Amino acid sequence: MSDDPEQIRAQARRAARLATEARRAATAVAANGSIRWRSQGADRYRKKLTDRAAEFRRRADDLDELSRLLYSHARHVEDHEHAIGKVVGFVEHHIDPLGFLS
């Protein structure tokens, strides 16, 4: 995992795009389930399509959650970088040329 917040956000955006693509695939697969012919084979086909569309939707939800977690991680990385910067600034301001706290 990168420690660069922008790279983390880029991966979050990628996960969100993949979620959108998975939802489109679910819609397309579900649309194929509206076949008119009747038989046991057609019923099995529709069931497989329904199951497959549901699986695409679940994966889309997982990808949305991943995206959310990545955005949150990027914010935490920035918060930690900011906190470290404050500590470094404090230390630099309070250390004399010999390396002692003043």
Image (spheres, rainbow, N blue to C red):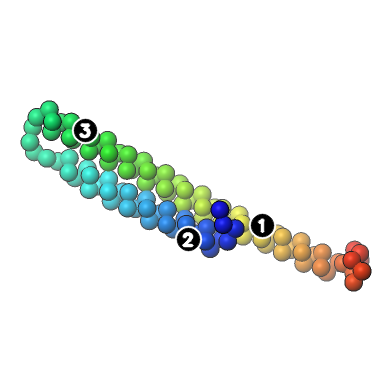
* Label at residue 10: 2
Sequence-wise first label, 3 or 1: 3
C-alpha gap between disc 2 and disc 1: 19 Å
Circle 2/circle 3 CB separation < 8 Å: no
Image coords of residue 34 (percent x, y): 14, 41
C-alpha gap between disc 2 and disc 3: 37 Å
Amino acid type of the residue that numbered disc 3 sits on in the rendered structure: Lys
In the displayed orientation, state which residue is furthest to the top: 40
On screen, residue 100 versus residue 29, left or right, reads: right
Image coords of residue 38 (percent x, y): 8, 32
Image coords of residue 45 (percent x, y): 17, 35
Amino acid type of the residue that numbered disc 1 sits on in the rendered structure: His
In the image, residue 61 above or below residue 13: above
For label 1, the residue is 80
Residue in the picture at 37% in, 50% down: 19
Sequence-wise first label, 2 or 1: 2
Residue in the picture at 31% in, 48% down: 23
C-alpha gap between disc 3 and disc 1: 49 Å
In the image, residue 30 above or below residue 40: below
Q: Which is closer to the viewer, label 2 or label 1?
A: 2
Dot 1 falls on a residue whose secondary structure is helix
For label 3, the residue is 47
Amino acid type of the residue that numbered disc 2 sits on in the rendered structure: Ala
Circle 3/circle 1 CB separation < 8 Å: no
Dot 2 falls on a residue whose secondary structure is helix
* Label at residue 33: none
